[in-house]
Image (cartoon, helix red, strand yellow):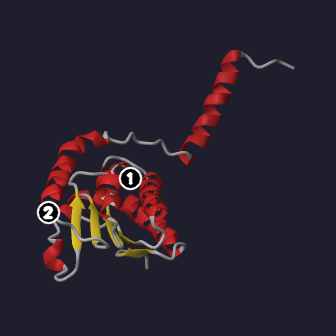
Amino acid sequence: MRLPTSHSRLFTLAALLTAWAPSVAAQVADPNPARFDSTFAEFAKWDTKNAFPRNGILFTGSSSIVRWNTAESFPGLPVINRGFGGSQASDIPSRVQEGVLKYDPAAVVYYAGDNDAEAGKSAQQIFEDIREFTEAVLAADPTTQVILLSVKPSPRRWEWWSEMQATNALMIAYADSKPTVILIGQRPK
């Protein structure tokens, strides 16, 4: 019987790693959330000069929230728009205190995920950031209604649609397990 050589052990290790690698998705590095410091400084400046409603409906997330004229879309409701364009799901938990909790909202409407998918993040990685954000909101006040908007398809990002659908599936299961979390939007047929 021959003892394995270092080359054969190395080959065996490489074969095992290759077989195992597809089941373990590599984490894509999160961008630095400090790139939004000036945006949050503007929010803080605005807040010192204006009143914001307590127990309002706070919208947060990427440019889909920024571009949404929430005051016009929800007339008569106490809305606060704190979207920040270009953000990824990982940016939002890092800003949860200054971007959400300081307003003591009764409800939070959240949208993110398509920028993440385009950046190469897996559905699981995107979902973990969404869950981290949601859990931080609920830890501060378990009665807060959290409304997650499903990741939307767009022609520009169609090549990542399967990852977005997988993210939506994870959000559906999560929302269904939490009494104060709702998912609105794309559901698989």
Relative to 26, residue 150 above or below: below
132 displayed left or right of 95 = right
Q: Position of residue 16 (x, y in %)?
A: 65, 36
Marks 2/1: CA–CA distance: 25 Å
Residue appearing at x 19%, y 47% in the figure: 41
Please, which residue is most extreme toward the right here? 1
What is the three-letter code of the residue carrying label 1? Pro
Which residue is disc 2 drawn over? 50
Q: Position of residue 178 (x, y in %)?
A: 52, 72
Q: Position of residue 138 (x, y in %)?
A: 46, 65
Nearer-the-camera pick, 133 or 153? 133
Occupied quadrant, residue 47: bottom left
Residue appearing at x 18%, y 61% in the figure: 66
Occupied quadrant, residue 141: bottom left
Nearer-the-camera pick, 40 or 27? 40
Q: Position of residue 161 (x, y in %)?
A: 34, 62
Disc 2 residue crowd, few under 14, some 14–19, many 20+, Cα 10 Å: few
Nearer-the-camera pick, 46 or 148? 46
Residue appearing at x 18%, y 72% in the figure: 70
65 displayed left or right of 92 = left
Q: Earlier in the sequence, mark 2 or mark 1?
A: 2
On the question of residue 35 being in view, the answer is: yes
Relative to 141, residue 27 above or below: above
On the question of residue 155 being in view, the answer is: no
What is the three-letter code of the residue carrying label 2? Asn
Which residue is disc 1 drawn over? 93
